[in-house]
Amino acid sequence: MRNVSEEVRTAVNKEIANRIQHFYPGKKTLMYQSPHEWLPNAAFVNCYKNGAESVGYHCDQLTYLGPRAVIGSLSLGVAREFRVRKITARDETGVEGLKRSAEKATSRADAEGQIAIHLPHNSLLVMHAEMQEEWKHR
C-alpha cells in the first residue's frame, strides 16, 4: 500500500478538486468537509474469492476520520461490480407519517434501485464527502 499511496493521494485530490469546481455550490467544500489536502491514512482490506462476493449494503462509519470523510477505494485482483443505492427514509407511523413517507419516496430513488459500477483490477473509486450520508454501497 505504501508503494501506491502517493499515486492514490494525487488521484483522489484531483477528483476532489474537480468535484468542488464542477458540482458543489459556490465552488466551495461542503459544510464540515475538511479543507485540507486528502492524505491516505488508513487501509482496510477485504479479500474475496471472486468478483461476485461482497459485504452487504452499508455506509462506512468512519467518524474517527472526521465528518464527511472522502474515501479512496483501490480494487485489486479480479474485476467486480461495486453497487450503490440511495438511502431511503424509514417508514413513519400514522396517516400523516404515511403521507410524508410517500412524498419522500417519490423524491428519492427506489429502495430496490441500484447503480452498478464496473471496477476492473487496479482501479480507484473515490467516494466523495457526501457519499456515506446519501448512499449505501456493497
Image (cartoon, helix red, strand yellow):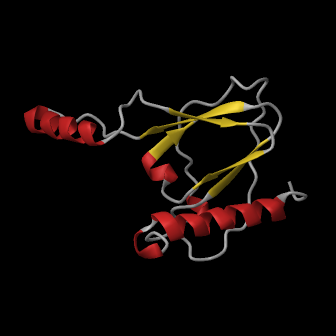
Left or right: residue 25 versus residue 98 is: right
Q: Residue at x 75, y 64 (%)?
A: 9
Expressed as whole percent of the image width and height from the top left, the position of residue 47 reads 78, 33
In this rendering, the answer to whether 37 lies above or below 102 is: below
Look at the picture and state if 78 lies above or below 10. above
Residue 118, horizontal then vertical, whole percent: 66, 35
Q: Is residue 40 visible?
A: no
Depicted 131 relative to depicted 115: above or below:
below
Residue closer to the observer: 133 or 24? 24
Query: In the orientation shown, which residue stands out farthest toward the right?
Result: 3
Residue at the image point whose x is 13% and y is 36% from the top = 99
- Occupied quadrant, residue 51: top right
Q: Quadrant of residue 39?
A: bottom right
Q: Which residue appears at 26% of the width and 34% of the height?
A: 91
As drawn, 112 above or below 92: above
Query: Whole-percent x and y of residue 78?
Result: 80, 30
Q: In the picture, residue 113 is in which quadrant?
A: top left
Q: Nearer the viewer, residue 9 or 45?
A: 9
Location of the C terminus (image quadrant): top right
Task: Specify whether 63 is left or right of 47.
Answer: left
